[in-house]
Amino acid sequence: MGGAEETRDGVTLTNLGQPLFDGAGATKRDLVDYLDAVSERIVPHLRDRPLSVVRVRPGQPPFMQKNLPKYTPDWVRRTGVWAEASHREVSYALCDDRRTLLWFANQRAVEYHPTLATIADLHRPTHLVLDLDPPEGAPFDVAVAAALLVRRALADTGLAGAVKTSGAKGVHVFVPVAGDATAEDMAAATRALAARAARLDPDLATTAFIREDRGGKVFIDSTRAGGATVVAAYSPRLRPGVPVSFPVSWDDLPSVTPADFTIRTAPALLAARDPWADAMPAPQKLPDDLVAEGHTIPVARVQAMHEGKRRARARRAAG
């Protein structure tokens, strides 16, 4: 059973009968069949974007793979990106076709995380993203409520976005941005939108990066900017039942749950359409006042790092 093999699009698929991961309720074949079924939907959202994947091997913890392994076939397109943190060039895959997607599926790559920029200009993201992260144990309803705050903040600014479930417990709002915005200005606009959305209902939402400062509120994460990755629409997630990140209309958002969209249910919901492409507004110019406001807001990760050091010093002094 575990050793079942077949070939699709020139890719040899192996061990298809093996369980995908503990709690998946699915086999490797189920993953391959799903990704094959939605290949025409997911590949356009991966194409030309350096790709990180989350893989899971039998008996091992999941891991995120950025650098392609040495045994990667020559026909997998790739691009080199300098990684400042590790001071080396990372060879990222470009998942531009069904064949590459099937190869990744055979590598037990469950999650697909493309960059927000394409190889045409890796310093210019194509979308601004806000990630709504509810507190542990909270119902999905609170993430939906926070997403609706973001929608109001966007509308108040003259912008529009599309929304999808993250496939985990949260919601992603994507705003396509016209090509003249720099990565720095887009990051600033993201911070300003997060702050404006949180101000609409400070009892529900917060921009506090440090978890202990959130007070049980939904975190509006503005850090998905610049070289960041976000899980792609239609990507499976490494969670029980293998849910997928799935687009929903703003009107339908209050009546869905992440569990509605799994590798078993999603293909039938797509049929011949791509609701993520259909829902995406045309690229928009960022308002100058939004960008200016964002440049006055500290970068959350940097601010959190300095605050963490300050608190550590205070604890040492108190001790």
Image (cartoon, rainbow, N blue to C red):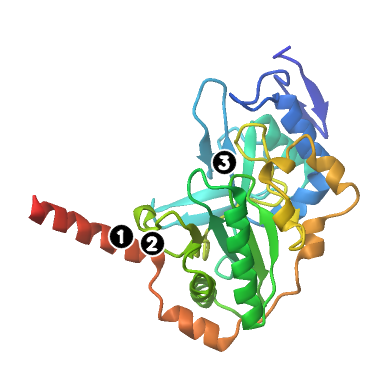
How many circles with numbers are drawn on the protein? 3
Q: Where is 24 relative to 243, above or below?
A: above
The amino acid sitting under disc 3 is Leu
Frontmost residue, 304 versus 140: 140
The amino acid sitting under disc 2 is Arg
Residue density around tag 1, few if under 14, some if 14–19, many if 20 or more, within 10 Å: few
Give the residue at mark 2.
301
The x and y percentages for residue 95 are 70, 48
**Label pair 2/1, CB-CB below 8 angstroms:** yes
Q: Where is 13 relative to 308, above or below?
A: above
Front disc: 1 or 3: 1
The amino acid sitting under disc 1 is Met
Q: Secondary structure at mark 3?
A: loop
Give the residue at mark 1.
305
Q: Earlier in the sequence, mark 2 or mark 3?
A: 3
Q: CA distance from mark 2 to mark 1?
A: 6 Å
